[in-house]
Image (tube, rainbow, N blue to C red):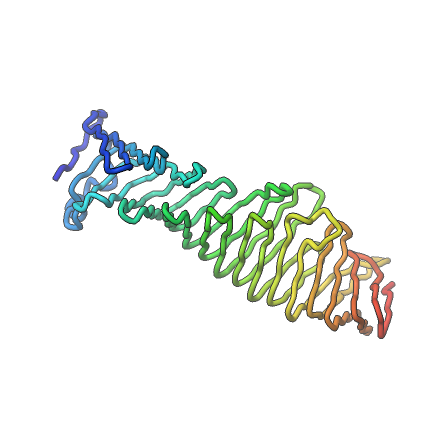
């Protein structure tokens, strides 16, 4: 059992290279200033701790490829030799294709047998696509899966169109090799358009699936999308980041669609337009909303019905195909 003593002067005490099969472990450790474990060593020993090292730099290579770099204020190694606890872990993990995953936290553990990194308290991570913050995180190095838990906040910049997507949730899972992330519980967020003159899109849902290969965001549960003066609700939704500047839908809602739109007409007259349909499509390039599936629009005392209804931004006109009633608000 090795327990380091406090010292104001850094003194090199450890330097090791361990080779196990195709795996290489390299560790540099030194005595250092007070650590969080100075007054808790007995508790850690009771849990099986066998050594305490400070100012640690740890490298792990497998099949001549870097897999993990770990810097920590303090490293506690346990009797099984394959598990360690780290204070202020800060480093990088590497995917099979060499992609870096940067991480930081106040505390963490690494289980060498399970290839599992666990981080807690003020967790910050950065992948090739996203910046992530959470209370806790787990990274399975073999499966290349990241799990976040507690106050999850992410920022992703779409390489397709330059939009920045912010998503908050209680929990999330990322399949890094598939470029997919699933957000669960209290999901909300917004999209900041690359062009500053374009309005933001706000959304919320019970479940959100984000696919960076297809550039599609799927929304499930109690779904809400807000854009300009329009608020729409449904049980399913989708946002197409790839097609925003074409004459194709940017977002769509389906299954019990409800829409509310605030209009300011001539002479500053304000009205609220409400609509119901089975499907809604938002065409951003033309600033129009298309309603299908027995759509109905309620405008003051008027009701508009048809097979297909088009609403255009903050305008007076309601376009209807096969209309039962046609209304133009003035």
Which residue is at 79% across, 66% downward?
309
Which residue is outermost to the left? 1
Q: Is residue 6 visible?
A: yes
Which quarter of the picture shows residue 95? top left
Estimate the x, y position of residue 113 in percent, counting from the top left: 26, 47
Estimate the x, y position of residue 203 in percent, counting from the top left: 60, 57
Q: Is residue 65 left or right of residue 76?
A: right
Q: Is residue 70 visible?
A: no
Which residue is at 28% across, 37% downward?
23
Estimate the x, y position of residue 156 in percent, counting from the top left: 54, 45
Which residue is at 79% across, 70% downward?
307
Report the number of numbered marks: 0
Estimate the x, y position of residue 244 in percent, counting from the top left: 69, 49
Comparing 179 with 27, the one in front is 179
Q: Is residue 131 left or right of residue 27?
A: right
Q: Is residue 121 left or right of residue 251?
A: left
Which residue is at 27% across, 32% downward?
26
Q: Identify the image quadrant of the C terminus.
A: bottom right
Residue 293 versus residue 57 in the image, above or below: below
Residue 132 versus residue 266 in the image, above or below: above
Comparing 248 with 35, the one in front is 248
Q: Identify the image quadrant of the N terminus.
A: top left
């Amino acid at each position: 059992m090795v327990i380091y003593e406090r010292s104001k002067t850094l003194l090199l005490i450890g330097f090791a290279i361990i080779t196990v099969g195709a795996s290489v472990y390299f560790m540099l450790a030194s005595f250092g200033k007070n650590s969080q474990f100075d007054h808790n060593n007995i508790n850690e020993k009771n849990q099986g701790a066998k050594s305490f090292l400070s100012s640690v730099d740890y490298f792990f290579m497998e099949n001549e490829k870097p897999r993990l770099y770990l810097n920590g204020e303090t490293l506690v190694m346990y009797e099984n030799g394959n598990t360690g606890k780290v204070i202020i872990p800060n480093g990088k993990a590497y995917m099979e294709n060499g992609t870096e995953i940067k991480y930081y936290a106040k505390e963490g553990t690494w289980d060498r047998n399970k290839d599992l990194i666990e981080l807690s308290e003020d967790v910050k991570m950065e992948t090739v696509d996203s910046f992530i913050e959470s209370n806790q995180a787990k990274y399975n190095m073999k499966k290349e899966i990241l799990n976040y838990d507690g106050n999850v906040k992410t920022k992703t910049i779409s390489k397709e169109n330059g939009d920045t997507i912010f998503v908050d949730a209680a929990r999330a899972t990322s399949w890094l090799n598939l470029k997919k992330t699933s957000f669960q519980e209290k999901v909300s967020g917004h999209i900041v358009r690359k062009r500053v003159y374009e309005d933001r899109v706000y959304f919320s849902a019970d479940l959100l699936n984000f696919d960076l290969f297809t550039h599609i965001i799927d929304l499930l549960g109690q779904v809400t999308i807000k854009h300009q003066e329009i608020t729409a609700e449904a049980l399913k939704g989708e946002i197409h980041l790839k097609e925003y500047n074409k004459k194709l839908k940017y977002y769509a809602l389906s299954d019990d669609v409800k829409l509310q739109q605030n209009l300011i007409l001539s002479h500053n007259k304000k009205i609220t337009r409400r609509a119901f349909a089975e499907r809604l499509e938002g065409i951003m390039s033309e600033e129009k909303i298309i309603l299908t599936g027995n759509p109905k629009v309620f405008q003051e005392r008027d009701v508009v019905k048809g097979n297909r209804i088009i609403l255009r931004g903050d305008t007076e006109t309601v376009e209807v195909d096969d209309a039962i009633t046609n209304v133009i608000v003035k």
